[in-house]
Image: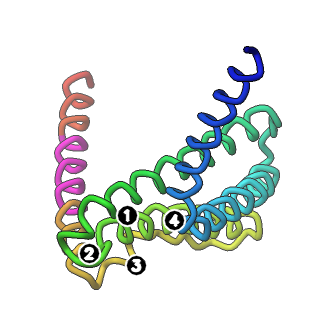
Amino acid sequence: MESNVNNMIATVVAAIAATVADFYAHLAPWLLFGAILVIVDLRFGIKASRARGEEIRPSRAWRRTINKAMDYLCWVTVAEMCSRTFAPAIGVPVVSMGMLIVIYGIELSSCINNYFEYKHIDRRISIFKLLKGTRWGSLLDKADERKAEAGEAETEEAEAEAEKWN
């Protein structure tokens, strides 16, 4: 009787594992790319922290790295779900491809910025600035303008408040 229960549990686990493996099979390059980016970001993040003279706590570094790896697993899963939802209607998995390019672009820019900081290079790279020439770039410009206007209004309010107290 016990061997039948064990066989049934093994069969259920094998069926679930086969389904998960089938779901992620063609996503292996994205998952591998994410793992590489997370490791590189950890490496250059530690080096950049040392260059800034910050204390490095291994437990925090590992916790953030594992959280980041799990986040990328979730993003790849969401992208695949979007691909299975929208790609048949559109014909091309544009939504999932765009999502993954933006997410991995953000991580790649983080890696590069940490490298620059480690090497004391005074440059910053932003994935959103790379989009400036596209339609999305014009939307980002409008958002930047609104932020700048809001910042000016806050500055004026702060100055008025300071003068009131003087």
Frontmost of labels 3 and 1 is 1
Tell me which label, 4 or 2, sits earlier in the chain.
Answer: 4
Classify 10 Å Cα crowding around label 3: few (below 14), some (14-19), many (20 and above). Answer: few
Find residue 52 and name its label.
none
Check the image and name the residue furthest to the top: 1
Magenta residues: mostly which secondary structure?
helix
| Label 3 – label 1 distance at C-alpha | 15 Å
Query: Residue sitting at 66 percent across and 27 percent down?
Result: 9
What's drawn in magenta, residue-wise?
Answer: 144-156
| Label 1 – label 2 distance at C-alpha | 16 Å
- The residue identified by callout 4 is 104
- Where is residue 133 shown, x and y percent of the image? 28, 85
Q: Amino acid at mark 3?
A: Leu
- Where is residue 54 shown, x and y percent of the image? 77, 42
Is residue 145 on the magenta stretch? yes
Image quadrant in which the N terminus is located: top right
- The residue identified by callout 1 is 99
- The residue identified by callout 2 is 137
- Where is residue 144 shown, x and y percent of the image? 25, 62
Residue 84, quarter of the rendered image: bottom left
Tell me which label, 1 or 4, sits earlier in the chain.
Answer: 1
Q: Are marks 4 and 2 in contact (CB under 8 Å)?
A: no
Find residue 130 and name its label.
3
